Amino acid sequence: MSVETDTPLLTPTGRLRAALPFWASLGLIPLVWLAAAKGGFFIALVPLSTWWLFIALDAALGTNPSNLDPQTEERQLRWYRLVTLVWTPLQLLTVYGVLFWLSRSDHLTAFQEWAVFAAIGILSGTIGINYSHELMHQRNRGERWLADILLASVLYSHFRSEHLLVHHRHVGTPRDPVTARYGEGFWRFFPRVLRQSLASAFHAEAAMLARKDLPWWHRRNPFWRYWALQGGFLLLALLIGGGWGLFLFLTQAFWAIFQLELVNYVEHYGLTRRHLGDGRYEHVLPRHSWNADHQASNWLLINLQRHSDHHYKPDRRFPLLQTYADEEAPQLPYGYPVMTLAALVPPLWRRVMNPRVRAWRARHYPDITDWRPYNKALNPPPR
């Protein structure tokens, strides 16, 4: 399966040294405070660091095809886990701390304040939602709560239900709103997903309750928790900064969601599972997600780009995610920082990715000659 021999984590010092590069995201928080203090060009440092810096680092460092031993014990991963645990309070302190400061000072123009919170949104989307994705997959109840808090802070709580109950179950099929179909540009994908993913998440939770003979409004429906947390965060922003503060909070939430769905678009573009008839599809395999093992961007994104293995083995913690050779999983030509920028320009995206999708189809499904049923618009989520 792996492209190199599995590497064990042997000593405490070795474990710490191996985990430290994944702490790179914490270096972005001081940049936000610097942007809030100085304004101007300093605001651009946040997107420049999350996108362009890691594009340059990927070009310099290349790929990392090595894999940790997937049987590594949980206790040996504490330095990896810790970064996802400390991020939640740091993000909240940053969002509300900057909001408190800017609402009581006048050293920035209104546009600059908006730009600061747009930059914060890039951070809370690139890092915060990504960490919530890692945390929601864990069995530990405290970690799942941290995931809910992070998602509520960007007003996208339903992502947990949609991701766990819909996306992982139906990825690569018409029942998954988040699977970008072949030929679908991002600017068509984004509004469709905003509409369909909320509906599919709610219907999935309601269906689970119905199987227990409970109505959708039962207290076990996590949407009550979602709404309560989101309402609390909105109220706090209003109390701290008034109407303008609420607008700034909504700004960071929008750009966080935008960043998330931009990544979602890249992860499965054009990849579909074979339809077996009667509404059944083949099991999810590594070939149903785009894989990338670019070293620097995987440090920033805690191995999110090893997405082929995440869908194949969703319960693996991020340091244990495996990378795959070309024969087993389709490979992105660049890491997510480059690919998400390319996705913003649909003609460029199609020029880069459509030939790769066609090559993937020829390799894994040479017997399928009519792809029109797989290319059709995604159906609305079933009720």
Image: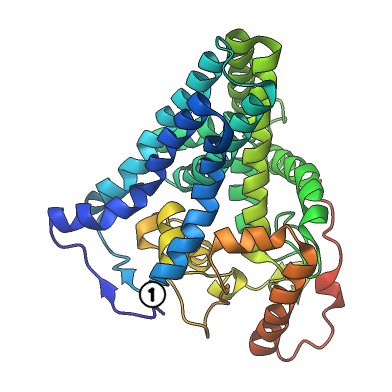
Report the side of 372 relative to 105 (left or right): right
**Residue sitting farthest toward the bottom:** 367
Query: Considering the numbered disc 1 on the image, is that residue within a helix, a strand or a loop?
Result: loop
Dividing the picture into quadrants, the one containing residue 40 is: top right
Residue located at (84% from left, 57% from top): 379
Residue located at (59% from left, 63% from top): 338
Query: Vertically, is 4 above or below 39?
Result: below
Report the side of 99 relative to 131 (left or right): right
Q: Quadrant of the N terminus?
A: bottom left
Question: How many numbered discs sit on the rendered protein?
Answer: 1
Say few, some or many: other residues with alpha carbon within 10 Å of mark 1 (under 14 / 14 to 19 / 20 or more): some
Figure coloring: rainbow
Q: Nearer the viewer, residue 79 or 349?
A: 349
**Image location of residue 293, percent across then percent down:** 45, 69
From this viewpoint, is residue 3 visible? yes
From this viewpoint, is residue 221 visible? no
**Image location of residue 198, percent across then percent down:** 74, 40
Q: Nearer the viewer, residue 61 or 153?
A: 61
Find disc 1 in the rendering and name its residue: 65
**Image location of residue 303, percent across then percent down:** 44, 59
Say which amino acid is labelled 1: Pro
Q: Quadrant of the C terminus?
A: top right
Query: Vertically, is 239 above or below 274?
Result: above
**Image location of residue 260, percent across then percent down:** 62, 47
Residue located at (48% from left, 65% from top): 306
